[in-house]
């Protein structure tokens, strides 16, 4: 029986024997004999291309000298297997099925079910990949489809675009845009590379920010400076000090940094960052928005 070695959204490696490939080669011949004029339309490839495909695989297996070999199939090639089997099992009549093909019709139906399951899994992986795709700022319509939360400071704005994955609930894709206030004639922003991040790390960021606000209400002297909110390979966030504005609103000086290229000598990883005052009200709005995204 054919076995999956590895599978991805666009290709799958299947362990095959020469007998199994020979079955498909004969199947092309039998299906073509029954539907010679509509083969290409119904199977979605020409008889010549289908025969050539299986003959090349058969030759590779024979040249390897092994009884089994892992063969890589693209999604379209898996659809070829599925279409051929579907024609033979459900659409046309092949007389002396087992004698001509070396498999019973029941065995062919089991193989069809197996192939269908593989193609469905590839489609699911493809959908998960599509859902996790994080476009760049130049593709704003698609970027707006992602959930976002903002940390607004005096002088800069950090926007976190978060997209959940279908394949796991423990990881999300994170894309960060750092926008810096400048003159009316100049717009300056820095974008991170979209990267996966553990949901637990973002939950820790929320908890630590809330812990910082709670400690500042109790005892400012107990707060370390800098107070680390999150230190990851994707970004760094920490506070430096706390004070009160002239409007009697509490704020913290927040330092935010994004990593640049790796250091050539692996001594200090270079970062680019900003520092500015963020009101406690804006911090609470940011953590509340992020919590809502992660728990929905």
Image (cartoon, grey):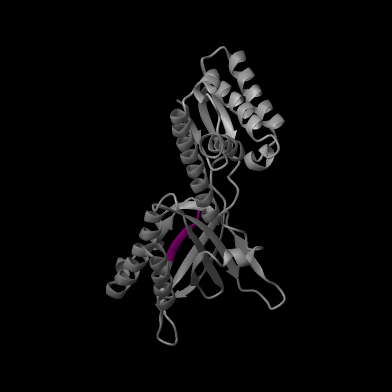
Residue 161 in view, yes or no = yes
Measured as percent of width and height from the top left, residue 197 is found at 45, 52
Residue 69 in view, yes or no = no
Taking the spot 52% from the left edge, 25% from the top edge, the residue there is 97
Q: Nearer the viewer, residue 274 or 124?
A: 124
The answer to which image quadrant residue 83 occupies is top right
In the image, is 96 to the left or to the right of 187?
left
User: In the rendered structure, which segment of residues is drawn in magenta?
Assistant: 234-239
Asked whether 6 falls inside the magenta stretch, the response is no
The answer to which image quadrant residue 11 occupies is top right
User: In the rendered view, would you say 129 is above or below 87?
Assistant: below
Q: Residue lying farthest left?
A: 218
Taking the spot 60% from the left edge, 24% from the top edge, the residue there is 26
| SS assignment for the magenta stretch, majority | strand
Measured as percent of width and height from the top left, residue 266 is found at 55, 41
In the image, is 231 to the left or to the right of 224?
right
Q: Residue lying farthest bottom?
A: 247
Measured as percent of width and height from the top left, residue 38 is found at 68, 40
In the image, is 213 to the left or to the right of 116?
left
Q: Nearer the viewer, residue 126 or 110?
A: 110
User: In the rendered view, would you say 98 is above or below 244?
Assistant: above
* Quadrant in which the N terminus is drawn: top left
Asked whether 236 falls inside the magenta stretch, the response is yes
Q: Residue lying farthest top?
A: 65
Measured as percent of width and height from the top left, residue 14 is found at 51, 29
Q: Nearer the viewer, residue 197 or 60?
A: 60
The answer to which image quadrant residue 138 occupies is bottom right
User: In the rendered view, would you say 171 is above or below 161?
Assistant: above
Taking the spot 52% from the left edge, 54% from the top edge, the residue there is 132
């Amino acid at each position: 029986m054919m076995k999956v070695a590895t599978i991805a959204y666009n290709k799958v490696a299947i362990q095959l024997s020469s007998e199994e490939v020979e079955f498909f080669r004969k199947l092309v011949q039998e299906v073509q004999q029954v539907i010679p004029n509509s083969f290409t339309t119904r199977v979605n490839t020409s008889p010549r291309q289908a025969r050539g495909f299986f003959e090349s695989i058969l030759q590779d297996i024979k040249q390897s000298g092994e009884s089994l070999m892992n063969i890589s199939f693209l999604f379209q090639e898996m659809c070829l297997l599925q279409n051929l089997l579907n024609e033979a099992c459900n659409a046309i009549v092949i007389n002396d099925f087992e004698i001509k093909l070396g498999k019973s019709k029941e065995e062919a139906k089991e193989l069809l079910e197996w192939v269908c399951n593989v193609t469905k899994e590839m489609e699911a992986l493809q959908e998960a990949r599509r859902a996790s795709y994080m476009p760049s700022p130049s593709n704003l319509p698609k970027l707006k489809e992602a959930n976002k939360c903002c940390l607004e400071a005096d002088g800069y704005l950090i926007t976190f675009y978060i997209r959940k994955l279908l394949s796991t609930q423990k990881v999300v894709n994170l894309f960060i845009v750092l926008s810096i206030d400048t003159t009316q004639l100049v717009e300056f922003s820095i974008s991170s590379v979209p990267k996966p991040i553990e949901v637990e790390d973002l939950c820790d960021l929320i908890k630590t920010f809330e812990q910082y606000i709670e400690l500042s209400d109790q005892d400012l002297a107990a707060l370390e400076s800098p107070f680390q909110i999150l230190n990851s390979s994707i970004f760094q966030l920490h506070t430096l000090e706390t004070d009160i504005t002239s409007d009697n609103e509490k704020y913290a000086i927040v330092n935010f940094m994004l990593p640049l290229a790796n250091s050539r000598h692996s001594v200090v990883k270079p970062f680019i960052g900003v520092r500015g005052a963020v009101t406690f009200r804006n911090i609470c709005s940011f953590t509340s928005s992020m919590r809502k995204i992660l728990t929905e």
